[in-house]
Image: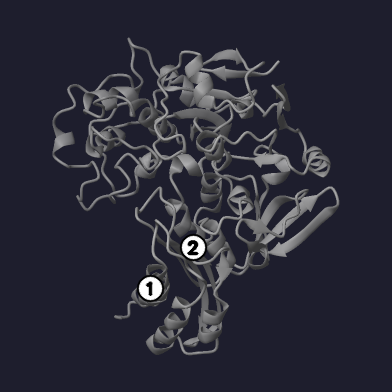
Amino acid sequence: MTTIKVNGQHAPLDGVPVHTTALDWLRDRGLTGAKEGCAEGECGACSVLVARPGIESATDWVAVNACLLPVASLDGQEIVTAEGLGKSTELHPVQREMAVRGGSQCGFCTPGFVCSMAAEYYRPDRTAPAGQRADVPTSGSGTGTGTGTGTCDTGAGIGISTGEHDHEHGPNGFDLHALSGNLCRCTGYRPIRDAAYALGEPAEDDALANRRSTPPPPPAATHLVVNGNEFLRPARLTDVLHVLAERPEARIVAGSTDTGVEVNLRGARPPLVVAVDRLPELREFEVGTDEIRLGAALTLTELERLLAGRVPLLAQLFPQFASRLIRNGATIGGNLGTGSPIGDTPPALVALGASLVLTSARGERTVPLADYFTGYRQTVKAPDELIRAILLPLPLAPLTAFHKIAKRRFDDISSVAIGYCVEVTDGVVRQARIGLGGVAATPLRARATEDTLTGRPWTEETVREASAVLAAEGTPLDDHRASASYRSAMLGQSLLRFYAQHLAAEGVSA
């Protein structure tokens, strides 16, 4: 029997159509706190908490977009909705802070904000940064906070420029990126931020906090067949490869952040969906002497925390990749598997000299990422192959940067994305790798620009010459995100910006 544990109660999945989203299933059960605002993972109104293997604890409470996940992918799992966080007679600390600090008006978006905020509230390593004061009245012990007036209106200690903490982290360690995937159109964000920054530590008897010490339930091997459509979660990688050998048309899903949009907005109904997100063989993480191995089914959030800044170029990329809600589900292998020319990870990984491990029932092979893309959403990956891992060679280049040009700073698709890895020795460029996205039918490597830089002095004259070459790389098009001329101009300006940033880091005036 297929079941999900929802707010502490087991609920059956048998007979539920394969392409039913977790959001629709929850609402059909009367749990209507989660809403559908956009059906593509941009508004966060559908946010719920899922128990997942933790980085700093046995279990992490992870906020995800319920509108994108097929509910079948949660078979055997444990989730909590806004209704399961508190009671009408005893609000959860997050709910209470949202209420007393004016964080909700129409309330449509509030349950989603509450779930995303709760995930950050329960993050095990959430602590106030060193040297920052936490002078906002806090909750978490169950004692309440009074009327919500006073210091929350003064700007002291709530992220307004006091000089004691940056504008994206609260004095209580709350990372505002946790809310980057939640939109509100009537309350305004300052009261919501006030609520986030007023949260203290969970109480000793907090059931969800204590739940973190016990591992989450293992994913259940699942096979559902309803109305001719199938959902399959094999227990082992060999089982997946056998399925792909027999049925190469199968739709592989991990976080479903791409397929979920097609199901919701384009009416896609793949006859066979195969989930691979929990396969141990795809979740390897290893830092060796010659390379870093990243399992394809690791989410962007997991990689961000596992790497912990070890790869500076990726550390710059992660906060700009969609939103925290999307990064909690989206996998690095999935972002490469779509073959999109505007994915954020390909330019950075091309610059890093990454290779992909492709596996099938026939065996494994390793392909340089720069040679992986062959056409618009086309790759060298055969229909029966799966991306198993991404390999990053070591040592890393000392000068790196990731530039993303988009209409919004966060939660947006790039018009142009550029990754840089440059090695300069004694004032001369010894090696340069530059990855580009959004300027051709595929992500590509800017080899002409690299050739212009390599062996030349790392000077403004060289960089200006190379920037003119970079502006002519690719075959950019006019579309609703940007014109071809704008994209070309951004390429050239990006290299000048990279050079200026390097000078600034060295303490040299441009």
Q: Which of 441 and 116 is in front in this view?
A: 441
Name the quadrant of the N terminus: top right
Secondary element type, mark 1? helix
Left or right: 430, with 381 as reference point = left
Q: Position of residue 349 (x, y in %)?
A: 57, 62
Residue that numbered label 1 is attached to = 489
What colouring does the structure picture have? Answer: one colour
Name the quadrant of the C terminus: bottom left
Residue placed at 52% from the left, 39% from the top? 261
Q: Residues within 10 Å of mark 2 (few under 14, many from 20)?
A: many
Residue placed at 72% from the left, 63% from the top? 367
Q: Position of residue 61 (x, y in %)?
A: 50, 31
Residue that numbered label 2 is attached to = 438
**Measured Cα–Cα span from mark 2 to mark 1:** 13 Å
Q: Which residue lies furthest to the top in this view?
A: 89
Q: How crowded is mark 1: few (under 14 residues within 10 Å), some or many (20 or more)?
A: some
